[in-house]
Amino acid sequence: MKLTLHIWRQKSPNHIGRMVQYEHANVNPHMSFLEMLDVLNEELIAKGEEPVAFDHDCREGICGSCGFMVNGVAHGPQPATTVCQLHMRHFKDGDVLYLEPWRARAFPVIKDLVVDRSAFDRIITAGGYVSASTGSAQDANNILIPKRDADLAMDAAACIGCGACVAACPNAASALFTGAKISHLSLLPQGQPERFKRALGMVAQVKQELFGSCTNIGECEAVCPKEIKLEVIARMNRDYLKASWTERPEITRGDD
């Protein structure tokens, strides 16, 4: 297969980026999208040119490291698929593809297709944990959990934090990611001690990271490679609203 690739090239956060065209004639339909870029990079290196920078790690669709826009769609045209699991057989000989990094104020471009997603780490740090000792797998199984709740928690826990939801949202909101991280803990008994404190902390961190507001457009759900549902946003909003009415700020000794 032969493809024409238009790829966003940007040396560093302080440089102005631009689209660069490449004619790629060595594309095997059995390659993954990242393997196709690997071959392109080998050709660029052989010609003494700078290879295209892109994030990747497990290449099995479970780590959330990879991700960029393919013809304006986060992770490309195949639903429920990360770009590392997207194979070239879904494209045709002669196709023209435009590759761009996630576009969001909270995800500044580091280089080419690589963006800084550490804002997600700080949201997790603000409350995405439990203080209860869960022990080993056998100990955890001693706590009976209704199957419906366990299934819903597992569905939310499938979020890999790739950032596609932010990139697809016209407001660059992180509501689907934050809602998933809040939901998968709030649905389990081990997550109850910090449930409402967690909602307040993580939503406050979202605002500090300059993500946009959610207006329930649904683009995030449409591009999510793990098919996280919008219902996690409703659950997050419910916990946050209740916490806003019931939670009091912690008072340290000497303040009262």
Image (tube, rainbow, N blue to C red):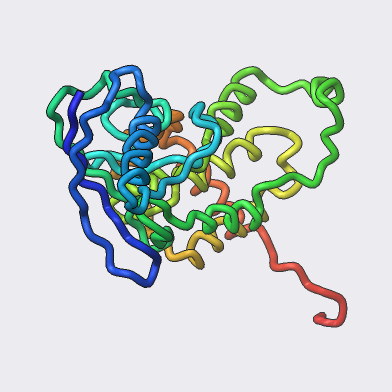
- Number of numbered discs on residues: 0
Q: Residue at x 57, y 55 (%)?
A: 123
Question: Looking at the image, which is closer to me, 146 or 55?
Answer: 55
The quadrant where residue 34 appears: top left
The quadrant where residue 46 appears: top left
Residue 38 visible at all: yes
Question: Looking at the image, which is closer to me, 131 or 226?
Answer: 226
Image position of 31 (left or right of 175): left
Q: In the image, is residue 48 above or below residue 234?
A: below
Q: Quadrant of the N terminus?
A: top left
From the top left corner, tell me how far across and down residue 110 is, in percent: 43, 60
- Residue extending farthest to the left is 94
From the top left corner, tell me how far across and down residue 236 is, in percent: 52, 46
Q: Residue at x 27, y 26 (%)?
A: 27
Q: Residue at x 85, y 27 (%)?
A: 136
From the top left corner, tell me how far across and down residue 206 is, in percent: 50, 59
The quadrant where residue 227 appears: top left
From the top left corner, tell me how far across and down residue 207 is, in percent: 48, 64
Residue 216 visible at all: no
Q: Quadrant of the C terminus?
A: bottom right
Question: Looking at the image, which is closer to me, 97 or 209?
Answer: 97
Q: In the image, is residue 150 above or below residue 6?
A: above
Q: In the image, is residue 21 above or below residue 15?
A: above
Image position of 136 (left or right of 236): right
Image position of 154 (left or right of 111): right
Q: In the image, is residue 39 above or below residue 241?
A: above
Q: Residue at x 15, y 36 (%)?
A: 96
